[in-house]
Image (tube, rainbow, N blue to C red):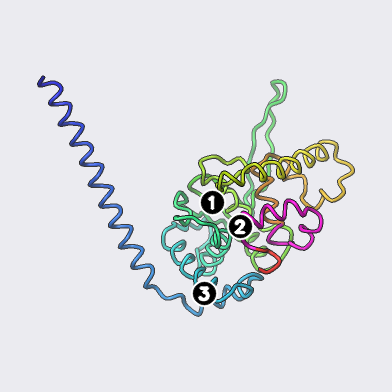
Amino acid sequence: MNYYYSLLIIILSIGGIVVFFYIAYSLYKNEKMKKISKLPFTQEYINILDRTPFYNKLSSDEKQKMHKSILIFMHTKDFIGIRVDVTDEMRVIIAFYACLLLLHIQTDSCYDNLKTIIIYDHTILAKQLSSNGGIYTKSNFLIEGQSSNDTVIISWDDAKKDAYHLQNDNVLIHEFAHEIDFMDGEIDGRPPMPYSKYHEWATVLSKEFNALQKISLKNRDWGKYRFIGSYAATNEAEFFAVITERYFENPNSFKHKFPDLYNELKSFYDIDANDT
């Protein structure tokens, strides 16, 4: 009897400690959000955003929402520079593109799982070890950006060029599309969405991804799929990230070439990229 009584006391004690820390963390988080909400969104920040091709296409209400989201992002993530000093421009631009993707997505978090933004000054040269038939080879490859569950790595030299000019590619949009993809716990090209939308999403994206993969393997007769590119054929997660880039960066061509894909992304992001 004493054994079970002692066990109950231990369980209740552990439960009490967990509840205490949960309440303490919630109070701390709420207090931090209150302080952030009182911070001004400075004219310097607005001047930075004015140079992007997206900011001034937002409505007044959207801009106000973005300002709040950017401040939350900037003050809840650790920005770490590697061989470069982190500037307000870096923080504002990275936060802007991250929050742009979530502008109309119903979510209670601002990338809650994301803790750290690591910024390099230039493209990162990484080494890769691979084997084929027991023969190991080393190769170098360039990284403009990379994301995991709690960390995003950005090459600022590449990100800055993408941030201020519309192109097919945008490393910031690409990496934060990965982060959105991971919000349901898996990075598989299927971001969190209402269950009722999954079937149509999977049908449309699988059809185009499979077609792209076949063409990429043959490396001929690319046709309209050259617009998406071979990197998107790597896996479903990269496919989602790349078409998100195309959706925001070159919406007219994307809509013309892939109307079904365009409509799926329009429905998911709840933004008509032709208007942004």
Q: Examine the residues drawn in magenta and state their main secondary structure.
A: helix
* Residue 259 among magenta residues: yes
Quadrant containing the C terminus in the rendered view: bottom right
Q: Where residue 254 appears, x then y in whole percent?
A: 77, 57
Three-letter code, disc 1: Val
Q: Residue at x 70, y 55 (%)?
A: 263
Q: Is residue 253 left or right of residue 102?
A: right
Q: Secondary structure at mark 3?
A: helix
Residue 37 drawn above or below residue 262: below
As rendered, which of 228 and 4 lies closer to the eye?
Answer: 4
Neighbour tally class for label 2: few under 14, some 14-19, many 20 plus, Cα within 10 Å? some
- In the picture of the structure, the residue carrying the numbered disc 2 is 269
Mark seen at residue 152: 1
Outermost residue toward the bottom in this view: 43
Q: Amino acid at mark 3?
A: Tyr
Magenta region: which residues? 247-271
Q: Residue at x 66, y 54 (%)?
A: 265
Residue at x-position 46% and y-position 63%: 74
Q: Are marks 2 and 3 in contact (CB under 8 Å)?
A: no
The spot of residue 145 in percent (x, y) is: 61, 51
Q: Pick whichever of labels 3 and 1 is earlier in the sequence.
A: 3
Rendered image quadrant of residue 10: top left
Q: Residues within 10 Å of mark 1 (few under 14, many from 20)?
A: many
Residue 186 is marked as none
- C-beta proximity under 8 Å, tags 1 and 2: no
